[in-house]
Amino acid sequence: MFLGTHTPRLDDKGRLILPAKFRDELAGGVVLTKGQERCLYGFPLDEFQRIAGQLRAQPMTHKAARAYSRVFFASAHDEAPDKQGRVTIPAHLRDYAGLDRDLVVIGASSRIEIWDKQAWETYLNDSEDDFADIEEGVLPGGL
């Protein structure tokens, strides 16, 4: 399970040093793809394969599943971290998420999310009131 917030930087070659806390789980490879809210999702290979199976199970007649699958798979890039725990983020994904130099990498349970630092701060600021106002029934089983 991925937890926490980390603030690495992109180097001049578009490489991200994965937070040390996440390296063991991602050592076998990571799949980077477009996420929602203009961030990137990073999945361990087995989790990506599980999600791919769920998407494959959807009927081809399901328009939303087709649309999501197209973007999800077409933008996906698999990468093996090097010995220093670095992965290269392709230019098309850096452009999509507006990644420049300062990043935020968050643990989001079964995936990591990679955000431009300013975009994350804006998102967090805008959504904290929503978080506080979540009503009973939104979360399965409640808290």
Image: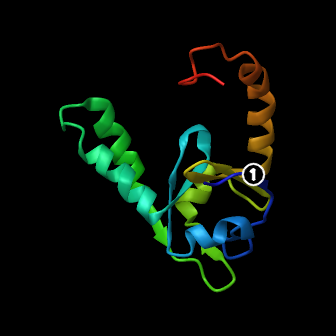
Please state which of residues 133 and 10 is positioned toward the viewer in this rendering: 133
Location of residue 88 with respect to 95 vertically, above or below? below
Is residue 18 visible to the viewer in this orientation of the structure?
yes
Is residue 88 visible to the viewer in this orientation of the structure?
no
The percent position of residue 93, horizontal first and vertical second, equals 55, 57
* Count of labels in the image: 1
Please state which of residues 105 and 134 is positioned toward the viewer in this rendering: 134
The percent position of residue 138, horizontal first and vertical second, equals 57, 19
Q: Residue furthest bottom?
A: 83
Location of residue 24 with respect to 62 vertically, above or below? below
Please state which of residues 124 and 46 is positioned toward the viewer in this rendering: 46
The percent position of residue 134, horizontal first and vertical second, equals 67, 17
Q: Residue at x 58, y 77 (%)?
A: 81
| Residue beneath disc 1 | 4
**Quadrant of res 27:** bottom right
Q: Residue at x 69, y 51 (%)?
A: 3
**Quadrant of res 88:** bottom right
Q: Residue at x 74, y 42 (%)?
A: 119
- Amino acid type at circle 1 is Gly
Q: Residue at x 80, y 45 (%)?
A: 118
Location of residue 136 with respect to 69 vertically, above or below? above
Q: How is the image coloured?
A: rainbow
For disc 1, the neighbor class at 10 Å (few under 14, some 14 to 19, many from 20) is few
Q: Is residue 141 left or right of residue 52?
A: right
The percent position of residue 31, horizontal first and vertical second, equals 48, 63
Q: Quadrant of the N terminus?
A: bottom right
Please state which of residues 50 and 58 is positioned toward the viewer in this rendering: 50
Q: Element under label 1?
A: loop
**Quadrant of res 135:** top right
Q: Quadrant of the C terminus?
A: top right
